Structure formats: C-alpha cells, structure tokens
Amino acid sequence: MSYLVEDDPARRRFEILVDDALAGFTAYRPRGADVLVFTHTEVDPAFRGAGVGEALIRGTLDEVRRRGARVVPRCPFMAAFVDRHPGYADLVTSTDEP
C-alpha cells in the first residue's frame, strides 16, 4: 500500500490517499497564520485496522512541523497519538481563541 497525506485547504482538512483512494481525513479550523485546531479524524471502515489513521496523523503533524505551525488537538484520536508519540508534543499549543 502507498500512502499520500495532503492538505485540502478548501475543505479545511488533511486527507490520506491509499493507492490513490481517499481513505480518511482529519479536519481543522485555522487560528491565525500558524495554528490549526484539529476537531475530527475519520477513516473509511474499509481501511480501519491497517494503520491508516496513524499514518494520516503522522503525515499531518510532519507537514505542520515543516510549515513551522502549531496544533491544538481537540480531536481525541490526534490527542491520543501525540500522547503516545512525545516527539510531536512540541507542536501542541493551547491557543484556541475563537
């Protein structure tokens, strides 16, 4: 399986493609120029249990880091991932003003 994680800013979500098929997404709300508040992650049932969700979050966080941005993980799945992978903790901020 080949994974591709890419941002779809028009839909305000990062998507993961598995062998060119949309397998899941993680939705966000932008806060200023450099903070993304992640609210929900969803993986198509056909791809669950194959590590697609973790690949999606890892790819998303890697891209956020590359941009020099930060995240507010309101999504429980993303928050749990960051808890299990402390190497991403530096990306987390509590800035969540409306």
Image (cartoon, rainbow, N blue to C red):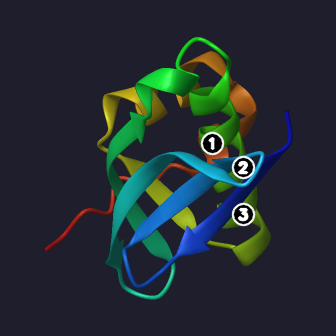
- Given residues 4 and 83, the one toward you in this image is 4
The CA span between labels 2 and 1 is 5 Å
Which is more N-terminal, label 1 or label 3?
Answer: 1
Identify the residue shown where x is 47% and y is 81%. 9
Which mark is on residue 63? 3
Image spot of residue 74 (x, y percent): 29, 43
Q: What kind of residue is marked 3?
A: Glu
Asked if one can make out residue 61 in the rendered structure from this viewpoint, the answer is no
- Given residues 29 and 23, the one toward you in this image is 23
Q: What kind of residue is marked 2?
A: Gly
Image spot of residue 92 (x, y percent): 51, 49
Q: Left or right: 63 with respect to 37?
A: right
State the image quarter where residue 45 is shown.
top left
Q: Are marks 3 and 2 in contact (CB under 8 Å)?
A: yes
Image quadrant holding the N terminus, namely: top right
Identify the residue shown where x is 37% and y is 85%. 32
Residue annotated with mark 2:
59
- Label 3 Cα neighbours within 10 Å, binned few <14 / some 14-19 / many ≥20: some
The CA span between labels 3 and 1 is 11 Å
Image quadrant holding the C terminus, namely: bottom left
User: For the residue labelled by badge 2, is the local secondary structure a helix, a strand or a loop?
Assistant: helix
Q: Is residue 26 above or below residue 52?
A: below
Q: Are marks 2 and 1 in contact (CB under 8 Å)?
A: yes
User: For the residue labelled by badge 3, is the local secondary structure a helix, a strand or a loop?
Assistant: helix
State the image quarter where residue 5 is shown.
bottom right
Identify the residue shown where x is 54% and y is 63%. 70
Residue annotated with mark 1:
56
